[in-house]
Image (cartoon, rainbow, N blue to C red):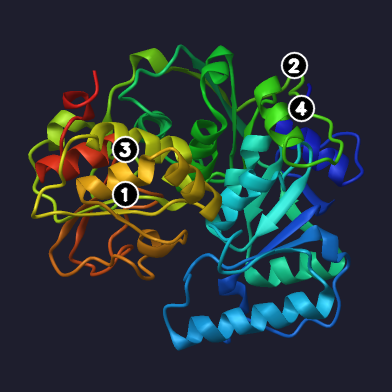
Amino acid sequence: MGMTIAEKILAKKSGQAKVGPGDLVTVEVDTVVLIDNSFTASRWREILKVRDPDRIVVVFDHRVPASTTDSAEAHGTGRRFVEKFGIRRFHDVGYSQGISHQLVADHGYALPGSVLVCSDSHTCSAGVFNCIARGVGEPDVVYSAIKGETWFRVGETVRYELGGKLSRAVTAKDAFLQISGEHGDHATQNVEFGGPGVASLSIPARKTLTTMGAELSAEFATFEADEVMEEWLRARNPRPFESVCPDKDARYAAVRKVDLSALEPLVALPDSVIRNSRPVAEAAGTRIDQAFIGSCANGTLDDLALAAAVLNGQRVASTVRLIITPGSQHIYREAAKQGIIATLAEAGAVVTPSTCGACGGGHLGLLGPNETCITASTRNFKGRMGDPSARIYMGSPATVAASAIRGSITDPRDFLS
């Protein structure tokens, strides 16, 4: 039997002709991403050497600008590390800052066939670029920086064949909610996306699907390569690469079809995204206090533009706080140039710096006791965004924007034909 995309990369990077489910492999690591959390006093241990400074990326993203004295101290530790080892790919507060997974896309740091690790759980986002990427423990990140290698257990792969094309009011987030709602978690498994429907999805839309692979508990989430992806990378990274295709006789745990044309707006009910999705109509009318659009899953230029299309000429309900966080400063600048930021602000949204912020309950929009939020971000777990008594619904940026206008959960098709 042949190999899937993840299996072929793991085989090549471990120097083996073939690997299969259940194998333990030690692989070369091409890119190590260190985030501000890595440098906090409770986690950081002084590193005496790194294998290759050019394989390391340092990003301050979780609490930017610094929200506490502890986070300010972590930033200082990170800056000293960057100076000590001459790390050139450094994203400090300012022009090139952003959420680490978005910066990987903005700068083409993840190339097809490569291995990327970071301590953040949504590192699987980079798999949109036909590579394998995973969040690992902090000691494993440090080991990868020092030794240039790490280990993985090879899991089975579930393949999703995408067909059709999304309608204007339906997004890749709705596609994820369909998959998580129908098929549940994918613990110990890899997820591979392919099929004719991929061509209709932008890179940001595809990235939403790989990012949310973490919420499926998937080991890796990967996309088949195509010219759209290859052109994206060539425009951002001059290094040569070779895309990886699954073998025609690759063995999958399951092959499932998703008709993008048949999808409708969905929401995940509070506390879980696994087998917890419902048509938006079933939650419509639920009063909200806060609406959030952002994170590594939904802070892209596409997402901000869609929200602006819903909000254009409208006004956020007086009872709602609409918080919007671009995924990177690059996205913020592009949105400003296109008038998107002005439209959002005129509608009453608060646009924050590029950071994880409200998504992880760090700062810039925590929820109070018994409040209700609808979010286009990564997680809706109890206590994730603030007080444990708060209720968090999850939807697409279009659904969140429409709900902010009405002051209650609303079908975005009411505003988008």
**Residue under label 3:** 307
**Residue under label 1:** 272
Measured in 3D between alpha carbons, the distance from the residue under mark 1 to the one under mark 3, in whole angstroms, is 24 Å
Measured in 3D between alpha carbons, the distance from the residue under mark 4 to the one under mark 3, in whole angstroms, is 40 Å
Which of labels 4 and 1 is toward the front?
Answer: 1
Which of labels 4 and 3 is toward the front?
Answer: 3
Residue at (38%, 35%) from the top-left corner? Answer: 305
Q: Is residue 251 above or below residue 66?
A: above
Measured in 3D between alpha carbons, the distance from the residue under mark 3 to the one under mark 2, in whole angstroms, is 42 Å
Q: Amino acid at mark 1?
A: Ser
Relative horizontal placement of residue 270, taking residue 43 as reference (left or right)? left
Say few, some or many: other residues with alpha carbon within 10 Å of mark 4 (under 14 / 14 to 19 / 20 or more): many
Q: Secondary structure at mark 4?
A: loop
What label does residue 3 carry, if any?
4
Place of residue 12 in the rendered image (x, y in percent of width and height, measured from the top left): 87, 39
Compare marks 4 and 2 and give the one earlier in the sequence. 4
**Residue under label 2:** 249
Q: Secondary structure at mark 1?
A: loop
Q: How many marks?
A: 4
Measured in 3D between alpha carbons, the distance from the residue under mark 1 to the one under mark 2, in whole angstroms, is 35 Å
Residue at (57%, 61%) from the top-left corner? Answer: 97
Q: Amino acid at mark 3?
A: Ala
